[in-house]
Amino acid sequence: MSAISLSAKPALGRGFRLQWEAAQEAHVLLYPEGMVKLNGSAGAIMSRCDGVRTVSEIVADLEQTYGATGLSDDVTAFVALAMARKWLEIQE
Amino acid sequence: MTLGGGGGVGPPLWLLLELTYRCPLHCVFCYNPTDFARTGSELDTESWIRVLREARALGAVQLGLSGGEPLVRDDVEPLVAEAHSLGYYVNLITSGVGLSEPRIAALKAAGLDHIQLSFQDSTRELNDFLSSTRTFELKAKVAALIKKFAYPMVLNVVLHRLNIDHVGEILEMAERMGADYVELANTQYYGWAWLNRARLLPSREQLQRAEEITQRFRERVGRKMQIFFVVPDYYEKRPKACMNGLGSVFLTIAPDGTALPCHAARMLPGLAFPNVREASVRSIWQESAAFNHFRGEAWMKEPCRSCPERSKDFGGCRCQAYLLTGDAANADPVCDLSPHHHLVTQAIERASRADARGELAANEAPLVFRDHRASVALAGREPA
């Protein structure tokens, strides 16, 4: 798989839905007859992948929100993993 | 884990509504109860909506609409709309009979997330024989409609000894239809499938051939089509973690409103399954004796009680334990640690002998098709 470009605009994969579930105190990813409970950082990244924002904008937003720096590698690695699982897709 | 008061009980994440036992098909491997003809009247639309609201408030989020054939009801659209607005991910599990273009358009508009289409085989003759109807061409049309409305195309094919040798053709058919996911689900033996087990259980050789063909096909098509091959429990050495333990995450509501911890659990004796007509989903899930009975480990017998794997597989399937041994608290006999495991290996040996000398004679074990008349006859025969 090629590296994730910082200008890419990831969006949820077709057939997937992301929502906050109060009963599980987590973001969950819903798909045909299945469900993944996301950990905090996965939920924070996935909930920003709207097909409009670029990866670099998502990184900047996360760094600002969580008062952190140098998140770029972690975010691109997660986006690559999520794309391999079809959770995310990058629209051209 | 704390039990009884609901304090330690997690949410029923998966809600399955069996809207009706009515079905235009008559599949020999159906897991519906064989005595479905004697169940009471179906819940009305308002009651189903109340169930949806109450279960969602408890944390239910994955919703299956099934049956029977759910589309024989004319209120699937308002139920989908309500479920969607409540935040469920809504799955329709259908034979495709009744899924016309106007209807799929209305379901899409109502917020239906996903459709699982069942097929009996790749050939019209066997599809129609096994479901005892003429539905193959209709299903092929429905598959095209599912693609047209931009749904992921999920095809479910139930495998057994009469069609498992066609698994290559089945996969080619799925590829032609543009399936994104294919579930090759070997029959599990409950309900009508249990009645027909002698004719349906494949031999070990059949199963191995089918797995090899599936693996070669996977390597050829790559990631565009995901194929799940579900081995029959009988060929496993350890039991499945059935329903993740009864009363853990899974809640079924039968057509008459009976609440069950698994769609097959109605057969389990000695448990008074509550009905949503008489109790709230919350009290049923958290407080009823029937739902608490198989929670935790107190109900277990040896060898499960002291088994290091008991927290992983929860002793397997209670229904299978009951059907094969007569006691639902026994270890699932699929497990080779079970003192009843020979009941499973004997069934497999019979299947292999039948395979070696060709098909069983029809009069040796006639197939019983799932229909109302057969159900009425079976309902009068105890035990079901």
Image: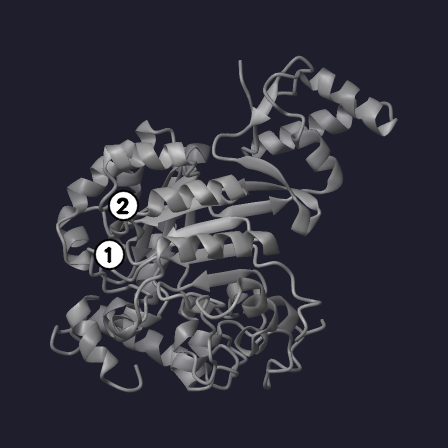
Q: Amino acid at mark 1?
A: Asn
Q: Position of residue A66 (x, y in %)?
A: 84, 29
Q: Residue at x 50, y 86 (%)?
A: B339
B72 or B64: nearer the viewer: B72
B16 or B57: nearer the viewer: B57
* Chain that bears disc 1: B
Q: Residue at x 73, y 27 (%)?
A: A75
Q: Residue at x 49, y 77 (%)?
A: B332
Q: Position of residue B267 (x, y in %)?
A: 39, 77
| Residue linked to disc 1 | B163
* Location of residue B298 (image quadrant): bottom right
Query: Is the residue B134 above or below the residue B152 in the image?
Result: below
Q: Position of residue B146 (x, y in %)?
A: 32, 34
Q: Amino acid at mark 2?
A: Ile
Query: Is the residue B125 above or below the residue A74 in the image?
Result: below
Q: Earlier in the sequence, mark 2 or mark 1?
A: 1
Q: Is residue B185 left or right of residue B82?
A: left
* Location of residue B322 (image quadrant): bottom left
Query: Is the residue A8 above or below the residue B367 in the image?
Result: above
| One can see residue B152 in this view | no
* Chain that bears disc 2: B
Quarter of the picture containing the C terminus of chain B is bottom left
Number of on-image labels: 2
- Disc 2 to disc 1, C-alpha distance: 9 Å
Q: Position of residue B60 (x, y in %)?
A: 56, 53
Label 2: which secondary element: helix
B259 or A40: nearer the viewer: B259
| Residue linked to disc 2 | B170
